[in-house]
Image (cartoon, coloured by chain):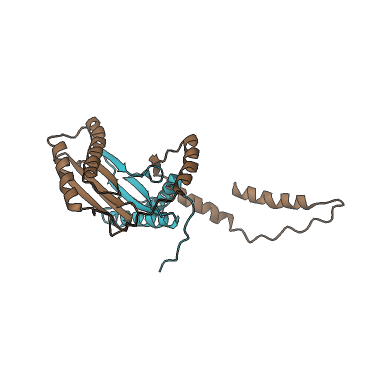
Chain colours: A cyan, B brown
Amino acid sequence: MEEYHRHCEEVGFSADEAHNIVKECIDGVLGGEDYNQNNINQWTASIVEQSLTHLVKLGKAYKYIVTCAVVQRSAYGFHTASSCFWDTTSDGTCTVRWENRTMNFFFNVFAIAIVL
Amino acid sequence: MEKRGRGGKPSSSTASQLQPPPPPPPPQPRRERRPSMFEREAYTQILKERLRDSIHDVQYVEPPFDDSIADLGKEWKSALAKLKFANSYRMEPLKKFQAHSVETKAQQILKESLKDVKYDDKVFSHLSLELADRILSAVKEFGYHRYKFIIKVLFIQKTGQAINIASRWIWDVAWDSWVAVKQETETYVALALVFALYCE
């Protein structure tokens, strides 16, 4: 049973915090590892779930969507675009690109406010 | 660096306690035993080793990071957010998000716009944005009230490498949903994700 997290009074999505959380999660799970077909599923799942848990622990009244794409490092083309229909005053996003000797990581956090 | 700073502090605190006539300086307060120097250096060194080959950067962030804009934004946002909305007494959306109809529409848009399009760097960078906007306006046309949408479009060139895409979310399971459509050709794969969230 998880402990109850206090409701945070701050409002406004802090992209800085989100970026730090994501970076820590990735470094923790993938620091120094090489691309491995067997483990990649497990790694992406754990990174995404861990960052989601940490984001929730911030205690803000937000819904979160976390997306990540991991590609083996080679010569390839990759394009990504996103279009959002939301309340620009309270909602926000943060994209982090992390790379390693053998893989590229594209991470996206979307935070949508819940009006209580 | 940290150790020097730590060492500096206790001496300054004892200096401030000195008063004329100076009594024998009180013994330095016993701090808890610092971890061994070797341990601390080892940890940073290990971390550096592990991360030596990795770099990261933040691609895009919204709200914008500029100082001037950010300060204004924060006060304004918190003021705005504290506004209470009038009660609508509505517990659920008028029209629930129907994933299957949006899926067919999105698939149709992908098919039309990517018919006979070969992979090309410059074309694809603005095609992806254009597609995202098109799918967004199509989804808005469906007329789901009080829903917020997030559309994500990915193009991956097929060169024999592996790619893994994962998403997780925290939302209201009763009303929020998502749709994924894929269009595959000889040279590339196009993937579009649509997330719909009900705004309470």
Give the answer, above or below, for where B60 lies relative to B41. Answer: above
Q: Which is nearer the eye, A113 or B28?
A: A113
Where is residue A29? Give x, y as percent. 38, 54
Question: Can residue A75 be spotted in the picture?
Answer: no
B130 left or right of A97? left
Where is residue B144? Give x, y as percent. 25, 49
Q: Which is nearer the eye, B30 or A86?
A: A86
B93 left or right of B104? right
Task: Assign the N terminus of chain A to one quadrant of the image.
Answer: bottom left
**Image quarter of residue A76:** top left
Count the marks: how many? 0
Task: Assign the C terminus of chain A to one quadrant of the image.
Answer: bottom left
A90 left or right of B72? left
Q: Residue furthest right?
A: B21
Q: Which is nearer the eye, B86 or B83?
A: B86
Q: Residue furthest top?
A: B122
Q: Residue at x 58, y 57 (%)?
A: B36
Q: Residue at x 17, y 50 (%)?
A: B101
Give the answer, above or below, for where A54 lies relative to B68. Answer: below
B44 left or right of B199? right
Q: Residue furthest left?
A: B116
Where is residue A77? Give x, y as percent. 25, 37
Q: Residue at x 28, y 54 (%)?
A: B93
Q: Residue at x 72, y 52 (%)?
A: B13
Question: Can residue A81 be spotted in the picture?
Answer: yes
Where is residue A79? Give x, y as percent. 26, 38
